[in-house]
Image (tube, coloured by chain):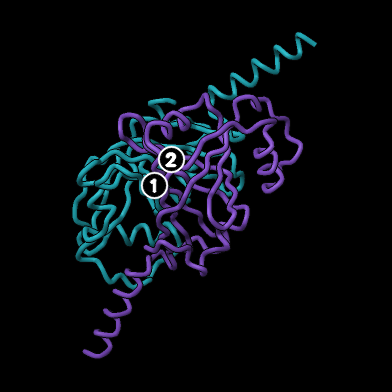
Chain colours: A purple, B cyan
């Protein structure tokens, strides 16, 4: 876990991949869903509408976790933990349109522009996973293998 | 949202796809990660180890949500909400080995067999998404389009 984005996994935020976002429902249970997102090097931005459950979840508890999986290597993932910094209207769905362009869905009619909001998430921690293992887990396995080798 | 698995999305649990699992950390914030899973038609089963954070999360709060995304159609997903029914040891990592077979990773050495556990999740609700929309959202958009058509 790191407060800085590991450069080994930065591409996962830069590429138009899917965020698997976890939020907290009013009763404290988790909700998870697939989201488009944008990354400017500092903040993650999601589009949503102000009439849906996830918006209400985030109004009540702004803590989120999302992860991105490398489509070319399913065991290379990045988890981002953070909190909602702002949820503001998205006039004319301008931000949503930029996501449509990022994800190759330009021109799909937007019927809910008047309720679209931009959710800005400030990351607090990054957890990089490679080969299905986090960094501390990789270190533990490496140490174990070394012990076995030395013992054998 | 439905208490029964929608047959339109049952294949997402039957195929060896990835579960994007959300759990609750001790401070009430969400955690999300990529997991292998098995589905027997009634329960989802995950493998984990008893010395890691997710295990501690689930001991304290057994409520989970996970979703599966169709790799052939990213906008077709299924969210499963549920609760942990049991977390028991996995002697000789027999269940973990069955997951290795399901996911084509047979024969990869298992160094943590003695702490492997089977997490059994009982689903309480299913949310099927098609074209990025849940069923109620699809109905609302269809009604809106019909109104626009009738008005025009």
Gap in Å between the C-alphas at discs 1 and 2? 7 Å
Observer-nearest residue: B115 or A23?
A: A23
A110 in relation to A79, above or below: above
x%, y% of residue B51? 22, 61
Residue beneath the point at 73% across and 34% down: A108
Residue A143 vs residue B102: left or right? left
x%, y% of residue B71? 57, 49
Characterize the local packing of mark 1: few (<14), some (14-19) or many (20 or more) Cα atoms within 10 angstroms.
many
Circles 1 and 2 on the same subunit: no
Q: Name the residue under label 2.
A: A32
Q: Chain for mark 2?
A: A
Residue B13 seen in the figure: no
B144 in relation to B14, above or below: above
B93 in relation to B146, above or below: below
Observer-nearest residue: B5 or A67?
A: A67
Query: Which type of secondary structure does the marked residue at label 1 adopt?
Result: strand
x%, y% of residue A141? 31, 75
Are the residues tagged 1 and 2 within 8 Å (C-beta)?
yes
Residue beneath the point at 45% across and 52% down: A123
Residue beneath the point at 34% across and 58% down: B98
Characterize the local packing of mark 2: few (<14), some (14-19) or many (20 or more) Cα atoms within 10 angstroms.
many
Q: Mark 1 points at which residue?
A: B21
Query: Which type of secondary structure does the marked residue at label 2 adopt?
Result: strand
Query: In terms of image quadrants, where is residue A138?
Result: bottom left
State the quadrant of the C terminus of chain B: top right
* In the image, farthest residue toward the right: B152
């Amino acid at each position: 876990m790191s407060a800085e984005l590991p450069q080994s996994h930065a591409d996962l935020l830069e590429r138009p991949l899917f965020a698997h976002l976890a939020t907290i429902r009013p009763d404290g249970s988790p909700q998870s869903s697939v989201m488009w997102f944008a990354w400017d090097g500092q903040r993650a931005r999601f589009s949503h509408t102000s009439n849906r459950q996830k918006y209400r979840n985030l109004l009540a508890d702004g803590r989120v976790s999302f992860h991105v999986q490398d489509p070319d290597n399913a065991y290379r993932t990045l988890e981002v933990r953070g909190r909602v910094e702002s949820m503001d209207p998205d006039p004319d769905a301008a931000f949503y349109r930029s996501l449509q362009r990022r994800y190759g869905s330009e021109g799909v009619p937007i019927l809910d522009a008047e309720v679209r909001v931009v959710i800005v998430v400030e990351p607090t921690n990054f957890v990089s996973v490679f080969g299905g293992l986090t960094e501390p887990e990789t270190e533990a396995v490496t140490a174990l293998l070394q012990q076995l080798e030395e013992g054998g």
